[in-house]
């Protein structure tokens, strides 16, 4: 079922979910991935997976396409609608190009066909987990910045909007009817509260938080 040409790799513990209606396939995949030090949880039905999948931290899903009741592509859409962020690797014996394109466009990290090389699958799992970890860290980072943004006073938030729009202190002061020294003080407070060291960093944070797309600020 697998070609034994994989090499050992030290990996941080992460959860790999497997969903395939073939019990032998689930066992083989589980055995392979556990030998690479992954925490693996296998399921032979979508229903069992939905009931038993409670991902915490970094995780990915190795998912068969053709299954009874609901196929892999439908499950992918359901997970998206539920807001469950999990990297998906499709593994199928009956795939085609349109199917793979649809899966990848919907966010799948890979689309593999059976039988699969052991090294290919392990590499795909590692890549999927790296994607999942990057996504998790991005969410954590964004949440931290959102919490910092919430600590700004209404005036500081107003000044920040002008700053990231590229306006000079004298322009901001004129727009807000205050002195340039006040704007300088507000800018210093903003930089400290947001935990950034440069204007470029502040602009990057504002873009991440879609600050310029939120409309007017309620005072």
Image (tube, rainbow, N blue to C red):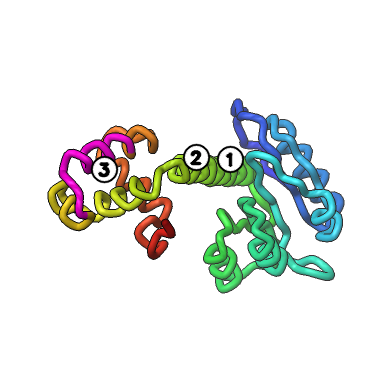
Q: Position of residue 52 (x, y in %)?
A: 83, 49
Looking at marks 3 and 2 on the same chain, the residue that comes earlier in the sequence is marked by 2
Viewer-nearest residue: 67 or 146: 146
Viewer-nearest residue: 175 or 58: 175
Q: Which residue is mark 2?
A: 144
Callout 3: SS: helix
Q: Which residue is mark 3?
A: 200
In which quadrant of the rendered view does residue 216 lie? bottom left
Residue shown at 71%/38% (left/top)?
33
Q: Position of residue 120 (x, y in %)?
A: 59, 45
Disc 1 residue crowd, few under 14, some 14–19, many 20+, Cα 10 Å:
some
Task: Please give the label number shown on residue 68.
Answer: none
Tags 3 and 2 in contact by the CB under 8 Å rule? Answer: no
Q: Is residue 123 visible?
A: no
Looking at marks 2 and 1 on the same chain, the residue that comes earlier in the sequence is marked by 1
Residue shown at 16%/55% (left/top)?
174
Q: Nearer the viewer, mark 2 or mark 1?
A: 2
Q: Which residue is mark 1?
A: 126
Q: Is residue 8 visible?
A: yes
Query: Which stretch is magenta?
Result: 177-189
Residue shown at 34%/48% (left/top)?
155
**Image check: 52 left or right of 11?**
right
**Image check: 7 left or right of 169?**
right
**Image check: 83 left or right of 173?**
right
Q: Is residue 186 magenta?
A: yes
Callout 2: SS: helix
């Amino acid at each position: 079922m697998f070609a034994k040409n994989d090499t050992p790799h030290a990996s941080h513990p992460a959860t790999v979910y497997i969903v395939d209606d073939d019990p032998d396939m689930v066992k083989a995949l589980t055995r392979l991935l556990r030998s690479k030090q992954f925490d693996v949880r296998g399921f032979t039905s979508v229903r069992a997976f939905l009931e038993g999948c409670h991902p915490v931290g970094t995780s990915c899903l190795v998912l068969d396409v053709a299954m009874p009741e609901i196929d892999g592509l439908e499950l992918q859409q359901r997970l998206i609608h539920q807001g469950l962020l999990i990297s998906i690797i499709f593994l199928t014996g009956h795939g085609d190009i349109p199917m793979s394109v649809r899966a990848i466009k919907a966010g799948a990290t890979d689309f593999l066909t059976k039988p699969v090389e052991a090294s290919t699958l392990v590499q795909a799992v590692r890549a999927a987990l790296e994607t999942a970890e990057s996504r998790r860290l991005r969410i954590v980072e964004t949440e931290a910045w959102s919490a910092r943004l919430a600590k700004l006073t209404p005036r500081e938030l107003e000044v920040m909007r002008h700053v990231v729009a590229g306006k000079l202190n004298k322009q901001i002061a004129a727009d807000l009817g205050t002195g340039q020294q006040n704007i300088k003080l507000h800018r210093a407070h903003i930089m400290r509260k947001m935990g950034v060291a440069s204007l470029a960093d502040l602009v990057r944070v504002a873009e991440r938080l879609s600050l310029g797309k939120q409309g007017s600020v309620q005072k």
